[in-house]
Image: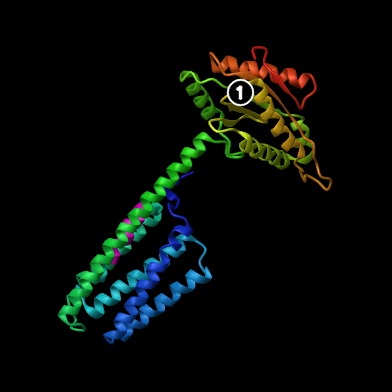
Amino acid sequence: MNYSNTMFYQLADIRRLLPAVWLAFLLYTIFFLTFESWFLAAFSGTAAAFLLLIQFKSVISRVYTLIIVIFLLTLSNALLTSWVLGSGSGFYFYLFIFPIFGWIAFPRTHMRWIIGTSVIAFFLSYFIPPASTQALSSMTLNSLFGINAIIFVLVVSYVFYLYFNKNRDLFNQLEWLAAHDPLTGLLNRRKMTQLLEHQLKADKTGSILLMDLDDFKSINDTYGHDSGDEVLTQLSEIIKSHVPEEGFASRWGGEEFLVYFPLEDPGKVKGYFEHMLADYQAHVFHFSEKPVTNLSFTAGAANLQHSLTSSVLEADNALYTGKYEGKGRLQHAASQ
């Protein structure tokens, strides 16, 4: 994928900006009406009404289209006010927002167009019109300049706030994806390995439970892979609800799950297993017209000690012993 041609912001991000934009146009409408600038009042009022329509009727569903609409309205407003009131009104400030916004948010192909258009509009609104057309008094024009400068700083600050906030959210998402299985939401094998190695280095005792779904291949073959995913997801939710504090669980691979319990008592580990198995067997799956129940899984338990590799191997051997002896049961490793 060419990430240079993707949008940084989503439609919801831009829609959060809309109230500030249409409110600004509405306030300028009132201002222009007060000073009898009928043409500017008509334009600002129309822009505010159009943006309100977008806000509450969702007539635009593409993020880039919405940005371009806001950009063109802002650009037109800057040009018109500069020519009618004079460049000293400070409306050209708003033309700098979009190059800044575009630089951090737009695909490169769009960014060039936005920046180029903004530069031309700035030239036409700052260098061509006089500083004042005498439509407003000098004091009013200076006040308007100051207000626009302050609003510009606030808007740019908010744009950067959104940018850094979005970056933080993306970082958190990537961090979560790096540590979790996307289907089940459990830890992935890599993160689980790191946590268990940390437990060993800290000399923390505990037990591991390696669980494997019984007859999972037949579920996939009979009902389809979507049904298989549903089974994995449901068991994951059951596991999450039973893992004790300071314990953690992972999707170890395929239909295998590895759970860490911060205790070594085989009886307590068996209790956790039995509760999870009972909940799983009681769950009703609707793969077809006939409800499916009483699915099962088998598990092998071992103490976490010495090395992670040997502990997992012990649990794995116990698991396959349990499979061989009847499935739907817990088998403890010989060392327990």
User: Badge 1: few (under 14), some or many (20 or more) residues near its Cα, within 10 Å?
Assistant: many
Q: Is residue 131 above or below residue 225?
A: below
| Residue at x-position 53% and y-position 31% | 246
Question: Nearest the camera: 206 or 136?
Answer: 206
Residue 155 in magenta stretch = no
* Residue type at numbered disc 1: Ile
**Local SS, label 1:** strand
Q: Is residue 304 left or right of residue 52?
A: right
Horizontal and vertical percent position of residue 1: 49, 43
For the record, the magenta segment spans 93-104
Question: Nearest the camera: 242 or 287?
Answer: 242
| Residue at x-position 44% and y-position 45% | 170
Q: Is residue 77 above or below residue 168?
A: below
Horizontal and vertical percent position of residue 166: 41, 50
Residue 309 quadrant = top right
Horizontal and vertical percent position of residue 171: 43, 42
Q: Is residue 66 above or below residue 247?
A: below
Q: Is residue 206 visible?
A: yes
Residue 47 quadrant = bottom left
Horizontal and vertical percent position of residue 104: 35, 52
Q: Pointer 1: what residue?
A: 208
Hey, which residue is sitting farthest left in the picture?
A: 138
Q: Is residue 115 visible?
A: no
Q: Is residue 112 left or right of residue 186?
A: left
Q: Is residue 130 left or right of residue 313?
A: left
**What main secondary structure does the magenta stretch of the protein show?**
helix
Residue 75 quadrant = bottom left
Hey, which residue is sitting farthest right in the picture?
A: 290
| Residue at x-position 69% and y-position 41% | 230
Residue 96 in magenta stretch = yes
